[in-house]
Image (cartoon, rainbow, N blue to C red):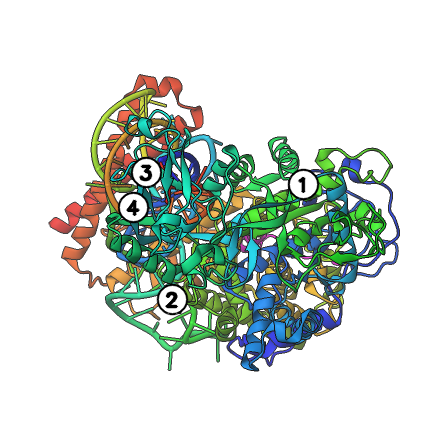
Amino acid sequence: MPQDLPKAYDPAAIEDHWAEYWVRERIFELAPQPAIPPESSNVDPSPDSAPESPGTQPRGDGALDGQANSPAQRNFTMLLPPPNVTGRLHMGHMLNQTEMDILTRWHRMSGDRALWIPGTDHASIATQMMVERQLATEGLSRHDLGREAFVERAWKWKQHYGGAILEQMKRLGVSVDWSRLYFTMDERLNVAVREAFVRLYEQGLIYRGAYIVNWCPRCQTAISDLEVVHEEQAGKLYEFSYPVEGEPGSFLNIATTRPETMLGDVAVAVHPDDERYTHLHGRHLLLPLSGGPGDHSTNRRIPVITDAWVSRDFGTGAVKVTPAHDPNDFALGKRHNLPSITVLDESAHMTAAAGAYAGLDRYEARARVVADLDALGLVVSIKDHLNSIGKCDRCGTVVEPLLSTQWFLKIQPLADKAIQAVEEGHIRFTPEQYSKTYFQWMRNIYDWCISRQLWWGQRIPAWFCDSCHEITVSRQDPSACSHCGSAALTQEKDVLDTWFSSGLLPFTLFGWPEHTTAMDRLYPTQLLITGFDILFFWVARMIMLSCHFMLDVPMPDGSARTLADAVPFREVYIHALVRAANREKMSKTKGNVIDPIGIVERFGTDAVRFTLASMASPGTDIAFSEARTEGYRAFANKIWNAARFIFMNVERAKEAGIPVDLSELAASSELKPGALASSAESKPGAPSIASSAMSGSESAPPPRLTSIESRWIQSRFNQTAADVNQALKDYRFDEAANLIYQFFWGEFCDWYLEIVKLRLDFTDRADKQATAAALNTLLEVFEAALRLLSPFMPFLTEEIWHAFYNNNPPARSIALTRYPQPMPELICPNIDSEMTILQDLITAVRTARKEAGVEEKAVVPILMRAAADERELFESNHDIISKLARVSTLDFPNTMPEGARSNPSFDVAIVYKRTVDIPAERDRLTKEVARYEKEQTNAQRQLANESFLAKAPAPVIEGIRRRAAELIVLLEKTRSALDSLNT
RNA sequence: GGGCGGUUAGCUCAGUUGGUUAGAGCGCCUGCCUUACAAGCAGGAAGUCGGGGGUUCGAGUCCCUCACUGCCCACCA
């Protein structure tokens, strides 16, 4: 082991190397393998029980590394939510990827066939924007290039910039299988997308029609409901008078927030029971300005209609009807067979139908309309009004509801299955509350507008016939109209919504529409981890589309697939939002975006990963804190230095002729897929490593694990391993991280290492076997702890682990070793509580020393009183007490001196000329008495309560009884200590 | 307008099915450069668990209510 590690951990010095190594050595690639026997029938729907897999299938080739394939192995397959090619890594990605990476590494190390598939999304609208922006710098628009050249340009853009985020991911050390990298516009995926479209069309689930859609005047395309972001905005509510036909001087007042659309009015609606307007039923109004501002005689006649949808309380109770520019009005128009007049065009300028206003921008037109109506005396009022305004998710332009012919996916049949899949528990959400959000959305779903008027994307495979005007939808480009046979065909110009293709990924990635062995092996995936922001965009759509299509794909054994196996994944874990330190949402406009790579460069990837993991408690947003990250960088440094300490002692051992053989230890960490429980790790009392390598003592019994600290650290390690495994099963990244942190720092370093220094005696007069035994346990626990930590801090642990094995490790990566599995027989509560008593004593002495003003380095005698068992414990561990509390002698006199500190297990006093601060000490004791008294009162009240005694469980009562007894003693001792101060 | 969260130490957050004395990190105070680590070690102070009511032998935890706060969904012109 190298001794020349730098004193302080420098992540920058090692991370690039390992990041590059993992990719170059293809550490995380899942080997392709032949078809395996059907395993779906016994697949556990949750990955929970995976690490307990009792499989016994040994590997045939004897090699340690590389991911083996064994029928006994469980799958752990996960898709990376494909980032947009336009994307740059942000903290949300990093959280998402950290969580996925921890779980993937954990599953891989637990013997599962772990596969995490990376890819990028073509992001049609976002990418097109980027390319258009680039063109703009050259003074060009996409129309200057034409469609074909533009698409070519977009591909070039993608080649050049689209990989940026992948490089950033590599820097983070994510353990994806890079050999399976995909792009959502890969040819094989394009084929699948087209197949899916055609099938849906043939099934009557895709239709084309003229409806009100959300139109972005800047992007010049329709967008789906989800792509519209609503914002509260201060606006105006205008009230105008429309003259009643044939009744000069008679008006009907209407209210609107969008005056410019009045030019497209085709009716005014009132509630049928609204008595204010009964006299106008069946009458007509003359739409002002419709004949031009100066010519009232040609104003359009529009009817007054009645409809129960109209709210009597809002505005005037009369609503103008503009079917071409409002979804409600559109519905109203349909019900009443009204025409629609489009007065706004695709760039939000007034059309010729707007007469004198043609060509004006929508807001100019609004101002003009209001002014002109005012001039006519038809403006009744203009009031402030808060209204919700829809903006384009991509570019922020105010969306225009526009009547437009688009392609839609009839969603209800798909939603029904998607609801059923979750209701029946085939898919489980964590945190559970998200299933409610999911249901609410699914149950109120609208048809999905899937066409986009863009050039970059998957073009809709539909052709219009110039002769018969019918539509031909086809898997292959048709040469003739399927209705009339004409060859005069024009392909639909629109492309598909990006989410259409990504919604198909869970099965298209495995080769659909072919029925492949990959599909048999890997579908469905086990888990999806994502933020709630794409719950509807992506998660819901994957569920709908996968259930729809996969139901038709037979199971590997040829039987029919049920919904339970048609789902795209079995579990969904929704993670939190990473916010800025002040809890604000990170946004470019606020300028508070934290660049993960910048933070990573400052603190190291591992520290940032650990920060995110430790703060990732389900359902709570993360306020990213640099202070926390600093703390975890310190943690990394702590481990680094623990390694230095250990390596140093291994060197000493060698010099002292105590050879260290790591081969057995290496064997115990071997990853045997599917054979986790059959452990080669050391048994109690028989450390597994180096025992056969004791110098010249081949017949000697192996050194035994008798020291309290060895047994304790083994106990604590195994308890920690058990808890960490459980926490990861529950997606409690925070708990898992905190458990490891507490173990490594609070127990292994703070206590165990300090104690073990006593045992690492390499002098000539030392008991070499004892030293070797201590060293063995030290190495064993440390090596196992590295593996435990490895999914959280892959870089640091990889570096130390290789150094541990002198760069000749038993596997190519620590990620290919076995995750520590708890050995219950090593968890020993008795040792734990003995150690706790020792720790309490040491702390009590330290505190007493501090209060008495004992110099840091001084060694003092202590006097104690304790029951026989404890006395034995203290005496037999005198060396530990001496070292850690700087104690010389330990005596048990008949009477204890004043100023002793009391504990249920012992009284202890230091022998030292007190320079104690009497008032402070009095203060402390007074508080202590008060605390004990309060506790005693509570305990006595409970013990006097018959109802409590009757109903509370026995252990609780017993605990309180015991405590009450302790309190009596403690109170007496503390009071007398206080008295002695007062005299 | 519906729906879902949050409120615990100065700050950021844990606290599992109600159960004995509510925890951690950072910050703060005190003392230490103790040969792995000053990115460290040791000791310490600090919380009426948002307010009120209820259920219970027992409530940070369950119920009701109020206050503040965040988010999602929604076609009220």
Pick whichever of labels 1 and 4 is earlier in the sequence: 1
Residue A789: where, in percent of width, then height? 59, 59
Residue identifier under label 1: A49
Taking the image as shown, residue A162 lies to the left or right of residue A836, namely: right
Residue A180: where, in percent of width, then height? 75, 61
- Relative vertical location of residue A453 with respect to residue A928 in this rendering, above or below: below
Establish whether labels 1 and 3 are both on one chain: yes
Residue A359: say if magenta: no
Q: Is residue A292 visible?
A: yes
- Tell us which disc is closer to us: 1 or 2: 2
Pick whichever of labels 2 and 4 is earlier in the sequence: 4
Amino acid identity at mark 3: Val
Q: Callout 4: few (<14), some (14-19), or many (20+) C-alpha neighbours within 10 Å?
A: many
Amino acid identity at mark 4: Phe
Q: What number is the disc on residue A240?
A: 4
Query: Marks 1 and 2, Cα distance to the nearest angstrom?
Result: 45 Å
Observer-nearest of A595 and A900: A595
Tell me the chain of label 1: A
Secondary element type, mark 4: strand
Q: Are marks 2 and 4 in contact (CB under 8 Å)?
A: no
Residue identifier under label 3: A244
